[in-house]
Structures are given as structure tokens and as C-alpha cells.
């Protein structure tokens, strides 16, 4: 059982400090959330971090990938999540093309914070450090994202595992250390092979939060909520553990309703 040590009296900065202090002590729990009722349920269940991820492009808005998500989408959903969550730290994703310069990264981050986000996340490492510093120097808590970067799926030609060669691992570690130095309070690792995830986790003072990186290779785990509850049956990543079948329950309930008319 993972214990949530956050509470609503804490400032966002205090929440990030509490999350950082869990490294090496207790696993950090994180889930995506996009709406009020789900955010409220996940918060009441004791989740540390709720990510208003740009995965909402696929699992909520029906786009083929995250490159269609706009700042307005994340603003709208961050506000809904903020109405539902009290204790968890709310992290809002910066969508593609909303952080092309340090000035734009800061302006977009400020809008997400005004909407109810308490921290922001963007994809990339060494190439993004100027933008990350603009965000952290303005006092906005920042979460990094390394490994497979979904906003680059078109350039990469698919979702590929990262950290397979020594040179890739070295580059990942260099980026992770640069993000830490720039003030990130944690880093999401996506689809990094287990051995490389362990090396990154050991190299950093800040927590790593893994998705598709193997079991217990990072300081915490993040999952897309629809994968956990089984409400998006049309695509389930191979690494996901489905713990409910909400799609089947909805179909059954609606058929029962239709039959009753
Ligand atoms: O958008 C998202 O859901 C994410 C997670 C995969 C980490 O960035």
C-alpha cells in the first residue's frame, strides 16, 4: 500500500518537496486525470500526483496521437481536475508547439497554473533547458519527461523503446542531470528499458516516475487512468495492467437500460 503524504494545506512547492523526499523511501503514485469525477476519486483514493496529460488527445478527445492537443484543451481539463482534487499535486502537460521558446514556455505555463495546475511538464532534455529554467526561475514547479516522447511520434515513426545502447543511456543520463540542475522536481521516464531506467534512477537525486519501464525500476509509477480502469478498450499498451473493465460495465448497463424501455 502506497501512502499519500500530501494534503490540501500544503503549497504546490511543499507538495513537490514531499514527493522528492519519498525517493528511496516509499513509491510515488501518479495517474492521469482529465475530468472532475475521476480526479476526485483518484485524489480521495490517495494518489500523489494527478497528471492532466496530453494523452487526453487520444483517450478523451479521439485523436490518433498527442500532436493535436492544444493549450486550450489542457487549460479546460486542468480546471476540471483542480475542482475535483484537493490533496494530490496537479501537473499539467504543455502540449506540442506551446513551448517553442523560453518566453512561450513561461507564458503557456502561467496559463496552466492560472487554470488550476500546480506544476507543469514538457518533453525533452538538453535541448529544452533554457525553457525549463524560464519556468523554474519564475517559481513554477516543473516535471521532466525523457525516453519515448509521444509528441515526436511522427518524426520517430512509432512508439519505440529507449536506452537500448550505451550511447543512448549516456545521453539520457546527461539530459536527466541537466533537468535536475535546471530545477525539475522529478522526471517521467517513458518506455526506457529496465536496466537503463535503474541506472537513471540511481544517477539522480530527484525521483524518476516510470511508464512502460518495467516493474520497480523507478522511484514511482505513472499510468494512464483509462488503461487502469479499462475504459478505453480500443488500444491498451502491452505493459498496462487493467484492474477493472469499465467499458464492459458501461455496455452492460446501457444494454440493460435500452432493454428496459
Ligand atoms: O500525457 C500523458 O499521459 C503522459 C504520460 C504518458 C506520462 O505524458
Image (tube, rainbow, N blue to C red):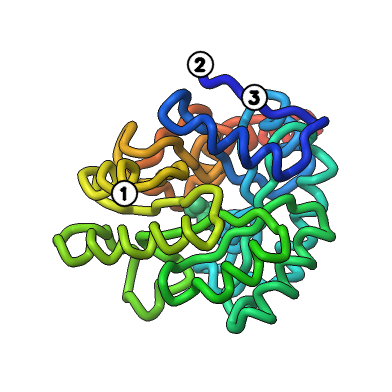
- Where 247 sits versus 235, above or below? above
Q: Where is residue 137? Give x, y as percent.
A: 67, 65
Q: Is residue 238 visible?
A: no
Q: Where is residue 40? Give x, y as percent.
A: 76, 33
- Residue drawn 58% across and 36% down? 19
Question: Is the residue under label 2 in contact with that under label 1 (CB below 8 Å)?
Answer: no
Q: Is residue 52 visible?
A: yes
Whole-angstrom CA distance, mark 1 to mark 2, is: 25 Å
Question: Is the residue under label 2 in contact with that under label 3 (CB below 8 Å)?
Answer: no
Q: Is residue 30 left or right of residue 89?
A: left
Of the two numbered discs 1 and 3 on the same chain, state the one appearing first in sequence: 3
Q: Where is residue 208? Give x, y as percent.
A: 43, 44
Q: Is residue 58 left or right of residue 193?
A: right
Q: Where is residue 156? Give x, y as percent.
A: 33, 75
Tell me the residue that label 2 is attached to: 1
Whole-angstrom CA distance, mark 3 to mark 2, is: 13 Å
Whole-angstrom CA distance, mark 1 to mark 3, is: 25 Å
- Residue drawn 42% across and 36% down? 219
Tell me the residue that label 1 is attached to: 200
In the image, 43 versus 24, the foreground residue is: 24
- Where 52 sits versus 73, above or below? above
Q: Secondary structure at mark 3?
A: loop
- Residue drawn 68% across and 41% down? 89
Give the label, 1 or 2, closer to the camera.
1
Checking the image for residue 5, the label placed there is 3
Q: Is residue 158 left or right of residue 179?
A: left
- Where 155 sits versus 209, above or below? below
Q: State the image quarter where residue 176 is shown.
A: bottom left
| Residue found at the far left of this picture | 166
Checking the image for residue 83, the label placed there is none
Q: Secondary structure at mark 1?
A: helix
Q: State the image quarter where residue 167 is shown.
A: bottom left
Amino acid at each position: 500500500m502506497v501512502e499519500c503524504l500530501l494534503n490540501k494545506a500544503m503549497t504546490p512547492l511543499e507538495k513537490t518537496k514531499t514527493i522528492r523526499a519519498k525517493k528511496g523511501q516509499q513509491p510515488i503514485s501518479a495517474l492521469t486525470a482529465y475530468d472532475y469525477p475521476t480526479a476526485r476519486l483518484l485524489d480521495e483514493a490517495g494518489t500523489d500526483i494527478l497528471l492532466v496529460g496530453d494523452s487526453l488527445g487520444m483517450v478523451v478527445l479521439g485523436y490518433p496521437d498527442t500532436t493535436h492537443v492544444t493549450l486550450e484543451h489542457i487549460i479546460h481539463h486542468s480546471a476540471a481536475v483542480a475542482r475535483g482534487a484537493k490533496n494530490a499535486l496537479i501537473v499539467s502537460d504543455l502540449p506540442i508547439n506551446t513551448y517553442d521558446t523560453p518566453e512561450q514556455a513561461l507564458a503557456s505555463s502561467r496559463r496552466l497554473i492560472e487554470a488550476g495546475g500546480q506544476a507543469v511538464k514538457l518533453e525533452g532534455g538538453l535541448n529544452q533547458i533554457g525553457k525549463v529554467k524560464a519556468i523554474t526561475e519564475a517559481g513554477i514547479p516543473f516535471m521532466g519527461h525523457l525516453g519515448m516522447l509521444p509528441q515526436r511520434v511522427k518524426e520517430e515513426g512509432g512508439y519505440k523503446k529507449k536506452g537500448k545502447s550505451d550511447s543512448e543511456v549516456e545521453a539520457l543520463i546527461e539530459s536527466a542531470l541537466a533537468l535536475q540542475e535546471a530545477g525539475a522536481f522529478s522526471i517521467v521516464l517513458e518506455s526506457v528499458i529496465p536496466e537503463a531506467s535503474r541506472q537513471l534512477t540511481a544517477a539522480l537525486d530527484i525521483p524518476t516516475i516510470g511508464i512502460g519501464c518495467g516493474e520497480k525500476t523507478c522511484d514511482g509509477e505513472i499510468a494512464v487512468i483509462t488503461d487502469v480502469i479499462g475504459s478505453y478498450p480500443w488500444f491498451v499498451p502491452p505493459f498496462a495492467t487493467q484492474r477493472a473493465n469499465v467499458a464492459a460495465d458501461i455496455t452492460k448497463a446501457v444494454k440493460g437500460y435500452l432493454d428496459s424501455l
